[in-house]
Image (cartoon, rainbow, N blue to C red):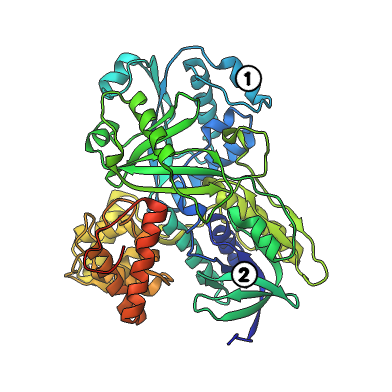
């Protein structure tokens, strides 16, 4: 039976990726009553499939997008400050194969050529890194670049190809848990505006009498009205607009795939650094340490089917070939892959442009109200992970103006989730650990792990764990009480929410069937799932692991695939 209750909101945001969640927090901070919905989990679409870089966009210098680079480096620096528990500095190396090649092709690209340059030489890279340092000066958090010659580079990374002539080094950043950052943005928004709501696994199913019809996770329906609607559905934007009666062709996405390798010798040579390199076809790839594994990405292929996207055998072969060319001193084969993922970037429709050259800048066209749809719909097109806060602030200002409201506070220096009151200095950290240890009974070593994982939210988890937590059988120390706290406090609807997004257990290759069953049992106790529901959750998890991530577990004796 439909739920006939109808609720009114100032703003409804459709899509809880990083742009939608960032906008939700911003508008909630301005005192608006907002609703954010997503047909899946928070951050389960494109926002869960990034390269995990928080970067200033070095390659955007090449396309002349100087404003985007300035904005991106500033936003990178803010994230290092506002979410230090999740965003960390990442020293980066660029192998260089010539001294002067690529200058004229780069000049053509800068002035609008739609073909990508090849073989960027030392002069070009030195110029780019110098500009990058200049644009990154605002709210600077990290050192400037430097260059070393071939002999020094090969002594440092012996597996590198001897074809290099030099190595550029600079700093960017990475986000350790992008899905968690999105979850924290949503929870921050709810705390800032108690009348607001967030509903994952909730689809917009139609428009009736000027109200949005929602299909909830329970299967029931709910009708809500809004003064303003924002379509933040990423690669699904045109499909959502169609549901709202709007014909649009805004998105021309490209697929980005990544793999995680179990390769200890590679990690030993990387020494915590990323290699940002040019493949033989001119495409930019990267490899860096991620939670004890090596993350490799990313492809850039035109695609338009976000519900079925997965890393293909051809892409894996491409990665293997590129790695062997870059690091001939190491062995690479598909058997080292523990996890794969892919997503579609919601880029603007740009027919005829090389995928790597499609702008990562953003836009926000507005469909004004019409008969039967009494609210405007703003579609968030493009953008990149790093600049979500700036994009959110820009759209929030437009929405506030349209509603006749004014901004109450800026988000430039607003901490995110567990980044609030995060102790950064050694003395502050020691004091925090001592205080919470006294309060919870937890060992300081365990508290340090929780603080690094959750920021200051670690206090709540430590209080739930107590002095003697019992741990799961996994490489990383996750406790039963910790998973229970997640299940009860982080909007968990399905088992995959815990396995794929609230923890790194899947992406780091730590899963096996017994661990999945134990996680399911914890969630079942928290949500009163029946045995039949538990079997459904395990079966659904097994299917998504195989289809989307190339992970096939041994479910022997369980009746599962």
Q: Is residue 429 left or right of residue 34?
A: left
What number is the disc on residue 204?
Answer: 2
User: Which sits in the foreground, 56 or 80?
Assistant: 56
User: Which sits in the foreground, 152 or 192?
Assistant: 152
> Measured from the top left, where is residue 293 in percent x and y?
29, 43
Task: Please tell me which residue is depicted at 46% across the width and 62% down the height of the picture.
Answer: 183
> Measured from the top left, where is residue 99 in percent x and y?
46, 12
User: Which sits in the foreground, 39 or 78?
Assistant: 39
Q: Is residue 528 left or right of residue 101?
A: left
Give the quadrant of the C terminus.
bottom left
Task: Please tell me which residue is depicted at 30% across the width and 50% down the height of the picture.
Answer: 508
Q: Quadrant of residue 19?
A: bottom right
Question: Is tag 2's residue or tag 1's residue first in the polypeptide sequence?
Answer: 1
What number is the disc on residue 107?
Answer: 1
> Measured from the top left, where is residue 241 in percent x and y?
69, 60
Task: Please tell me which residue is depicted at 65% across the width and 77% down the height of the picture.
Answer: 224
Residue 310 visible, this angle: yes
Q: Is residue 274 left or right of residue 64?
A: left
């Amino acid at each position: 039976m439909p739920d006939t209750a109808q609720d009114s909101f100032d703003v409804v945001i459709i899509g809880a990726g990083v742009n939608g969640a960032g906008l939700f927090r911003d508008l909630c901070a301005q005192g608006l009553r907002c609703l954010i919905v997503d047909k899946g989990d928070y951050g389960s679409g494109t926002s869960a499939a990034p390269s995990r870089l928080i970067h200033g966009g070095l390659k955007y210098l090449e396309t002349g997008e100087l404003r985007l680079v300035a904005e991106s480096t500033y936003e990178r620096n803010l994230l290092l400050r506002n979410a230090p528990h999740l965003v960390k500095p990442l020293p980066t190396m660029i192998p260089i194969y010539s001294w002067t090649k690529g200058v004229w092709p780069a000049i053509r690209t800068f002035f609008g050529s739609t073909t990508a340059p090849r073989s960027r030489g030392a002069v070009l890279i030195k110029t780019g890194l110098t500009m990058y340092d200049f644009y990154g000066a605002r709210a600077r958090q990290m050192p400037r670049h430097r260059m070393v010659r071939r002999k020094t580079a090969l002594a440092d990374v012996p597996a590198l190809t001897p074809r290099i002539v030099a190595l550029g080094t600079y700093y960017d950043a990475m986000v350790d848990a992008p899905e968690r950052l999105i979850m924290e943005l949503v929870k921050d928004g709810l705390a800032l505006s108690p009348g607001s709501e967030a509903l994952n696994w909730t689809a917009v199913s139609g428009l009736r009498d000027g109200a949005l019809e929602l299909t909830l996770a329970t299967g029931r329906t709910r009708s809500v009205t809004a003064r303003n609607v924002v379509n933040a559905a990423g690669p699904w934007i045109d499909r959502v607009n169609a549901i709202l009666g709007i014909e649009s062709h805004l998105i021309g996405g490209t697929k980005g795939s990544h793999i995680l390798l179990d390769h200890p010798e590679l990690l030993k040579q990387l020494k915590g650094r990323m290699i940002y390199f040019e493949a033989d076809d001119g495409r930019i790839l990267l490899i860096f340490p991620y939670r004890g594994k090596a993350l490799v990405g990313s492809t850039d292929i035109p695609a338009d089917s976000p519900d079925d996207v997965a890393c293909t055998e051809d892409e894996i072969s491409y990665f293997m070939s590129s790695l062997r060319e870059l690091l001939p001193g190491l062995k690479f084969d598909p058997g080292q892959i523990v996890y794969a993922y892919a997503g579609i970037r919601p880029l603007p429709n740009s027919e005829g442009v090389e995928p790597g050259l499609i702008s990562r800048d953003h836009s926000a066209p507005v469909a004004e109200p019409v008969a039967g749809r009494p609210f405007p719909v703003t579609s968030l097109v493009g953008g990149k992970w790093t600049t979500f806060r700036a994009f959110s602030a820009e759209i929030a200002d437009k929405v506030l103006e349209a509603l006749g409201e004014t901004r109450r506070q800026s988000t430039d220096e607003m901490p995110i989730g567990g980044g609030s009151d995060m102790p950064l200095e050694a003395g502050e950290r020691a004091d925090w650990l001592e205080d919470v240890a006294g309060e919870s009974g937890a060992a300081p070593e365990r508290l340090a792990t929780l603080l690094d994982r959750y920021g200051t939210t670690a206090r709540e988890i430590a209080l739930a764990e107590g002095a003697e937590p019992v741990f799961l059988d996994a490489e990383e120390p996750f406790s039963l009480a910790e998973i229970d706290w997640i299940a009860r406090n982080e909007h968990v609807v399905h088992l995959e929410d815990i396995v794929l997004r609230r923890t790194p257990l899947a992406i780091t290759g730590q899963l096996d069937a017994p661990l999945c069953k134990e996680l399911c049992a914890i969630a079942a106790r928290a949500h009163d799932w029946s045995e039949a529901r538990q079997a459904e959750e395990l079966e659904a998890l097994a299917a998504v692991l195989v289809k989307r991530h190339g992970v096939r577990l041994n479910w022997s004796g369980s009746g599962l695939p």
